[in-house]
């Protein structure tokens, strides 16, 4: 596993913790453990997708790619909630872009 993938998985796991805390607070502290784990795991999968050995691209294209990957991966979670958790869906798009931006900065 290369350094990019390791960093992306760690970043996805950390963003997942941040996301889970937000979702738990938004739910009034009633979110089920299965929901919370699924949301965290979704963020780890975003890290996996973003951390893949993609072709080198300019910063703007890479960040856009991260956002698109975040959208695609988050859509799976979003659809499993019955298209109810809009905030987590949108956050997944942002997290994909953030992860890619962070990885680009770490590579330079």
Image: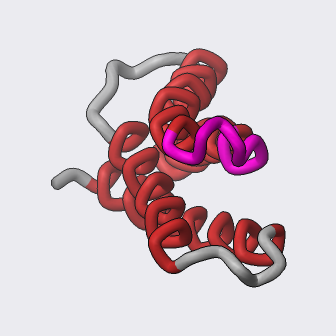
Q: Nearer the viewer, residue 85 or 9?
A: 85
Residue at the front extreme of this rendering: 82
Residue 25 relative to residue 105: left or right: right
Location of residue 55 in the rendering, given as x and y in whole percent from the top left corner:
33, 19
Residue at the left extreme of this rendering: 1
**Residue 22 picture quarter:** bottom right
Location of residue 65 in the rendering, given as x and y in whole percent from the top left corner:
52, 22
| Model colouring | secondary structure
Residue 81 magenta-drawn? yes
Residue 39 relative to residue 87: left or right: left
Q: Nearer the viewer, residue 71 or 27?
A: 27
Residue at the bottom extreme of this rendering: 29
Residue 83 magenta-drawn? yes
Location of residue 7 in the rendering, given as x and y in whole percent from the top left corner:
40, 59
Q: Does residue 101 appear in the picture of this structure? A: no
Residue 63 relative to residue 91: left or right: left
Q: Residue at x 65, y 20 (%)?
A: 60
Q: Nearer the viewer, residue 65 or 20?
A: 20
Q: Does residue 103 appear in the picture of this structure? A: yes
Magenta segment, which residues?
80-89
Q: Is residue 73 above or below residue 88?
A: above
Q: Residue at x 42, y 50 (%)?
A: 47
Q: Residue at x 61, y 21 (%)?
A: 64
Q: Is residue 59 above or below residue 23?
A: above
Quadrant where the N terminus sits is bottom left
Q: Nearer the viewer, residue 24 or 67?
A: 24
Q: Residue at x 59, y 63 (%)?
A: 15
């Amino acid at each position: 596993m290369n350094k990019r993938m390791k960093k992306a998985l760690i970043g996805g796991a950390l963003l997942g913790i941040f996301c889970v805390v937000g979702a738990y607070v938004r739910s009034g502290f009633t979110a089920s453990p299965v929901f919370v784990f699924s949301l965290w795991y979704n963020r780890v999968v975003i890290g996996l997708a973003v951390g893949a050995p993609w072709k080198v691209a300019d910063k703007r294209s890479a960040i856009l790619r991260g956002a698109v990957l975040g959208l695609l991966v988050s859509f799976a979670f979003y659809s499993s909630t019955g298209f109810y958790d809009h905030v987590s869906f949108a956050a997944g798009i942002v997290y994909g872009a953030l992860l890619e931006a962070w990885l680009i900065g770490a590579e330079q």
